[in-house]
């Protein structure tokens, strides 16, 4: 049988080591030898002896998620084998988190991560009830995180004295050491008259970076987070 479908770049090659890697720009391959975590419903294929179980949030995180809608609907993947993860054909990226690093990510952009990483749902200080959610997911520890983004992300450096303002529906994540607050870019009178559609942004200050996606629409018509 002959077809471009069977081109070498589409074929799965033998695994060389446990862990996460890009299968292609829209999917992640995870060679499991023990345990990893992924968003519920993200598995598109697997082989080997693997078990998929819903993962609890913990009492504190569960209450936060119930109130705000933010958080991760997670499943644990245990055993030995290979699993492939994807979400709505979004672009996938691997982030290596080292000891001392701390990354804030919108829950909707998390695909999978190593069990060695610590995950918490924390309040976005100064964000109030912004469109991007009152809570986001913070990752610390050491390990690899798989992130999805609708379109090609934009990474904007943030430096002291030069704050960056981002739409709360477009933000993917940022350096957790940055300080956050809400910024109103138009007057109350302008808002009453219809406004510009750009009333409130998330202001980030300090030394680090912020990641945004090239769209402020909410994926699938759902609320952010």
Image (cartoon, rainbow, N blue to C red):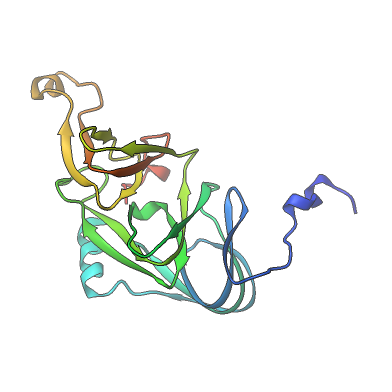
Residue 121: quarter of image = bottom left
Q: Tell me which corner region of the image, top left, top right, bottom left or bottom right, holds residue 153.
A: top left
Residue 78: percent from left, percent from top? 51, 79
- Residue in the image at 21% along x and 67% along y: 63
Relative to 39, 83 lies left or right: right
Q: Is residue 70 shown to the viewer in this render?
A: no
Corner quadrant of residue 117: bottom left
Q: Whole-percent x and y of residue 224?
A: 31, 47
Count of numbered marks:
0
Q: Quadrant of the N terminus?
A: bottom right
Q: Could you say where residue 131 lies in the image, as x and y percent from the top left?
A: 24, 42
Q: Is residue 6 above or below residue 42?
A: above
Q: In this view of the protein, which residue sits in the foreground, 95 or 37?
A: 95
Q: Is residue 224 above or below residue 62?
A: above
Q: Nearer the viewer, residue 63 or 211?
A: 211
Query: Relative to residue 61, is residue 165 depicted above or below?
Result: above
Foreground of the two, 100 or 96 = 100
Left or right: residue 13 compared with residue 89: right
Q: Residue at x 35, y 38 (%)?
A: 157
In the image, 20 versus 50, the foreground residue is: 20
Q: Residue furthest right?
A: 1
| Residue furthest left in the image | 189
Left or right for 27, reference 145: right
Q: Position of residue 21 (x, y in %)?
A: 59, 60
User: Visible in this render: residue 224?
Assistant: yes
């Amino acid at each position: 049988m002959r077809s471009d479908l069977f081109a070498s770049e589409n074929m799965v090659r033998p695994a060389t080591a446990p862990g996460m890697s890009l299968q292609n720009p829209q999917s992640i391959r995870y060679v499991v030898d023990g345990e990893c975590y992924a968003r519920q419903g993200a598995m598109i294929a697997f082989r080997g002896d693997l078990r998929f179980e819903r993962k609890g949030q913990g009492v504190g995180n569960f209450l936060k998620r119930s109130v705000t809608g933010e958080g991760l609907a997670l499943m644990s993947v245990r055993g030995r084998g290979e699993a492939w993860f994807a979400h709505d054909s979004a672009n996938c990226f691997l982030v290596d988190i080292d000891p001392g690093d701390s990354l804030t990510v919108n829950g909707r952009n998390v695909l999978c991560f190593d069990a060695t990483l610590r995950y918490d749902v924390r309040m976005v200080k100064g964000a109030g009830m912004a469109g991007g959610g009152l809570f986001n997911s913070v990752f610390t520890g050491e390990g690899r995180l798989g992130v999805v983004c609708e379109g090609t992300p934009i990474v904007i450096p943030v430096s002291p004295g030069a704050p960056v303002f981002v739409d709360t529906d477009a933000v993917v994540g940022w350096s957790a050491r940055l300080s956050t607050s809400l910024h109103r870019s138009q007057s109350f009178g302008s808002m009453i008259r219809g406004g510009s559609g750009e009333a409130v942004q998330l202001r980030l200050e300090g030394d680090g970076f912020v990641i945004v996606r090239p769209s402020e629409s909410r994926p699938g018509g759902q609320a952010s987070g």
